[in-house]
Amino acid sequence: MPQKKRSEEPKLIRHFVFIEAPIDIVAELALDWGRPIWWPKDIGMNYAAVADMPLAEGRTYRIQFVNILRLTLSARVAQYLAGRQIEHQFISGILRGGQTITLEERSNGTRVDIVTWPRAHGFFNTLLWKVFFVGAYNRWIDRILATIKGYSETIFNERRETV
């Protein structure tokens, strides 16, 4: 009986949200993760820039999973299109792969898509990812998107009321 060949391609994880606010307001929040002003307080994942540098290609982040074994992950901005898209490449820690956040302007707001392509390396990391992290990660991303939506729409409505 032939052996089943293991897939080298990671399974894509997709999330999206529609936000009733212009893209310029949404971009301030959705593309620069880990900013204390909007980052969910009770989430099990923290993003922090390693150095105080502007949002651009090469900026690195330390991502800590605080509720599960306190594991860390490092990511680097591999591509940045101002106000439209950012790609994080996971460079060390439990995962390799990456994540792309894309904003698309619509007539009545902004669509935010997050596509993650995680690749756990090694037996232990693969086990941790599949058993402990993947479900929590999906909940965290949903929570992050809901928070971005809430903040963006509040900012937009406040600006609209003052005009």
Image (cartoon, grey):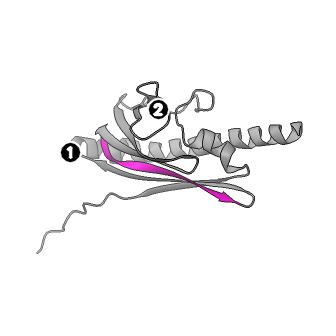
Q: What is the three-letter code of the residue carrying label 1? A: Gly
Residue that carries the numbered disc 1 in the rendered image: 122
Q: In the structure shown, which secondary structural element does the residue marked by tag 2 occupy?
A: strand
Report the residue at 24% width, 46% height from top: 121
Question: Would residue 143 be counted in the magenta stretch?
Answer: no
Q: Where residue 16 sits: x, y (%)?
A: 57, 55
Q: In the structure shown, which secondary structural element does the residue marked by tag 1 occupy?
A: loop
Q: What is the three-letter code of the residue carrying label 2? A: Tyr
The crowding category of the residue bearing disc 1, from other C-alpha atoms within 10 Å (few below 14, some 14 to 19, many at least 20), is few
The crowding category of the residue bearing disc 2, from other C-alpha atoms within 10 Å (few below 14, some 14 to 19, many at least 20), is many
Q: Main secondary structure of the magenta part?
A: strand
Report the residue at 20% width, 45% height from top: 122
CA–CA distance between discs 2 and 1? 24 Å
Q: In the image shown, does 136 or 104 lie closer to the viewer? A: 104
Q: In the image shown, does 57 or 101 lie closer to the viewer? A: 57
Q: Where residue 127 sits: x, y (%)?
A: 28, 45
Q: In the image shown, does 20 or 141 lie closer to the viewer? A: 20
> Is residue 89 positioned above or below 53 on the image?
below
Q: Which residues are magenta?
A: 94-106
Q: What number is the disc on residue 47?
A: 2
Report the residue at 41% width, 47% height from top: 134
